[in-house]
Image: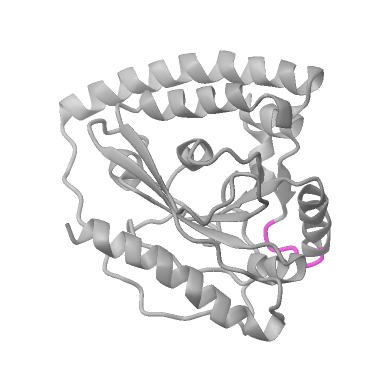
Amino acid sequence: MAEAEPQLDEEHVASAPPAPVEVPSDGPFDYLMSGALWAAGLAWLAPMMGAQMVMHRLVGPPRMQWLERLYTRGQVALTGSRWRAEVHPAIDPHGTYLFFQNHVNHLDHCTAYAATPHFKQGVELEDHFAYPIYGAFMRSRGTIPVQRGNLRALANLMKRMRAEVEQGHSLLIFPEGTRTLTGQLGELQPGVFRIAVQLGVPIVPVTVTGMYRVMRKGSYLIRPGHEVTVHCDAPIETADLSRRDVPVLMEQVRSVMQDRLDAYWGQ
């Protein structure tokens, strides 16, 4: 459920990138604590993913949401983080949405999944299906693979996403296409926005704050003691939009997510 990377084109929205966030340096105790948290997290991940893969075969992923929520909440808790969600009342718990989330680390799918009751199918780079345990888990769940740099693969991506939507499933997507290196929102990619317009499915901007302090790209350390908040803002309709509206739609989503990050880092 991470790092889907649609292609850039003339519709790409350019904006001045915010300044990188300064974070404190790590000491010996941080390495020891991180090692213990990694051990606890892996001891939770392996049996929980194994149990889910068995249940995927027996009853299907949409019918075992209680187990997926237990797994994702537990995985975040084992980073030593406090978790909470703020969900806009306009989000229909029975609706179908494209949840567009800022991309911080490899636990992003766990961070946001339990924020709403929707079954959320993932969209992830094809390379990640080679990961031990996690790759098998994604295949059993029906996660949609994305081929990096392959324009022709966008047609298949569209087909797979439409099939999920027609079943009433929501999708969890990372429109930046890669994890942040700065703690700020990266440049959004237009491919998934064009697909959203074609599908006519509302976009829910999802902004996770606090997770960059816990774990970030370029470091394997887990840093406990932070509050992680999942902000699910009001849905943005796409049903009456066309390809010409994609830049404006991208800016709407970017503005909501950037405002959340600005408020967090400005505290």
- In the picture, the quarter occupied by the C terminus is bottom left
Using residue 165 as the reference point, say whether residue 71 is left or right of it. left
Frontmost residue, 10 versus 109 = 109
Residue 151 included in the magenta stretch of the image: yes
Residue 12 included in the magenta stretch of the image: no
Q: Is residue 21 among the parts visible in the rendering?
A: no
Q: Residue at x 40, y 17 (%)?
A: 39
Using residue 60 as the reference point, say whether residue 253 is left or right of it. left
Instruction: Please provide percent x and percent y for residue 158.
Output: 79, 60
Specify the segment rendered in magenta. Answer: 148-152
Instruction: Please provide percent x and percent y for residue 237.
Output: 62, 69
Q: Residue at x 16, y 46 (%)?
A: 24
Q: Is 10 situated above or below 61?
A: below
Frontmost residue, 162 versus 75 = 162
Instruction: Please provide percent x and percent y for residue 115.
Output: 48, 40
Q: Is residue 135 among the parts visible in the rendering?
A: yes
Q: Residue at x 77, y 63 (%)?
A: 154
Q: Is 231 situated above or below 236?
A: above
Dividing the picture into quadrants, the one containing residue 16 is: bottom left
The colour scheme of the drawn protein is one colour
Frontmost residue, 217 versus 175 = 175
- Secondary structure mostly seen in the magenta stretch: loop
Q: Residue at x 72, y 32 (%)?
A: 62
Give the number of marks. 0
- In the picture, the quarter occupied by the N terminus is top right
Instruction: Please provide percent x and percent y for residue 18.
Output: 30, 70
Q: Is 61 situated above or below 213?
A: above
Frontmost residue, 66 versus 73 = 66
